[in-house]
Amino acid sequence: IPRPAPGPVSNLKFGQLPSNHGALAEYTAAIEDQNVANEEVNLALTQRSLDWNMNEEAEVAARRALSLAPESAHAHFSMGMVSHRCATDGAPEQRKQRIQDAIEFYTKAVTLAEHDSFPGLIPEVLINRARIHGALGKHDLAKQDFERAVEKAEQPSAYAETAVRYLIHEEDFDGAIQLASSFDLNREEARFLRILIDIEGAEEPDKRQLCEELLSFTVSDSQIAIEARYHCAQIGIDLKDYSLAKRSITSNLKDGTPFCAHTLSAWILQEEGENESAVEHADSALDSSAKGAGRQELMLLATVLMRQERPEKALPLLQRAYQPGILNECTRRLVSCAHRLQRHDVLMRVCSELRCPSGKPA
């Protein structure tokens, strides 16, 4: 969630606070007299509390900031972020109200920012509201907010990148191409997303060239490097060129992220028809640490295990990847897996969460 940029907070240097949230106690005495009557202090406390996943403390500070400055765009934005975070992380039964609160706070923040001439705040708010609309399946509203955020931004590339990621996920490549015109191609993320756009509809020779460009991202340890590997593997599998797909599994990946390396190997080998080797790599992935693995990686390994007729090993991975209350592909696979295993406890829990009148979390 993008954070508001807090203004000067007296002599306190919140940007230099230690990363350990327990250290906040050292500053309690210094801020005790100011936080009751200072909007800036409370905005900074909201920011820091959210950074440390202290949602309750963030809400106290954000509400105090709003009570001190009820017409402040930044205070409404902070309340929007708190509601947004609580919709994502909080109790499912409160999700619907939290989502509605976040939308209302963001909408008011945009209005106030326009009135009070805070142009830098507007795209931040719009991006957050777009994420909520997108998660709720309101594609037109999400796209509208993304486009407006890019239009309002002084340096639009970062906002365009966030928007294009969403549009690619929704397979709206026309919209993605339009917003990609705002990319700063000196940025790694922008270059990466531009390649993903170009892959769509490309002929085989062009796909091979684009795969080579994707492989150039894999020399680093960044999240983009991991994504690039999966896209390269997918291109190789689509072309039935499994040697090309296996080039995504480099020695530094095997050494640094064995879970990812074995998951990719299992996937490619399964597609290639090398079933015994695929089982060995899937087992090695299960034996490796999945700490830091993303939902897509967990889901991919679970999918391989399901194809290997091993739903009992897939279920824990799908439970980790599943987002309560969201009906998406991961949820469908979890339900299918639980049904095969006759895990009625899992089915009842998932159905109960989906029946919650909360819609989808952002």
Image (spheres, grey):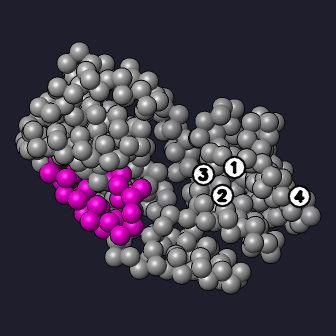
Q: Is the Cβ of the residue at disc 1 closer than 8 Å to that at disc 4?
A: no
Quadrant the N terminus occupies: top left
The kind of secondary structure the magenta stretch mainly shows is: helix
Q: Residue at x 74, y 36 (%)?
A: 256
Q: Residue 298: which numbered mark, if any?
A: 2
Which three-letter amino acid code belongs to the residue tagged 4? Glu
Asked if one can make out residue 342 in the rendered structure from this viewpoint, the answer is yes
Q: Residues within 10 Å of mark 2 (few under 14, many from 20)?
A: many
| Measured Cα–Cα span from mark 3 to mark 1 | 9 Å
Q: Residues within 10 Å of mark 4 (few under 14, many from 20)?
A: some
Where residue 93 sits: x, y (%)? 35, 70
- Between disc 4 and disc 3, whose residue precedes? 4
Identify residue for label 4: 280
Q: Residue at x 12, y 48 (%)?
A: 111
| Measured Cα–Cα span from mark 2 to mark 1 | 8 Å
Which three-letter amino acid code belongs to the residue tagged 2? Leu
Q: Residues within 10 Å of mark 1 (few under 14, many from 20)?
A: some
Which three-letter amino acid code belongs to the residue tagged 1? Ala
- SS at circle 1: loop
Q: Is residue 89 left or right of residue 300?
A: left
The magenta region covers 84-110
Q: Is the Cβ of the residue at disc 2 closer than 8 Å to that at disc 1?
A: yes
Identify residue for label 1: 290
Q: Residue at x 60, y 60 (%)?
A: 320
| Measured Cα–Cα span from mark 1 to mark 4 | 17 Å
Q: Residue 294: which numbered mark, if any?
A: 3
- Is residue 279 a member of the stretch shown in magenta? no
Along the line of sight, the residue nearer the viewer: 137 or 40: 40
Q: Is the Cβ of the residue at disc 2 closer than 8 Å to that at disc 3?
A: yes
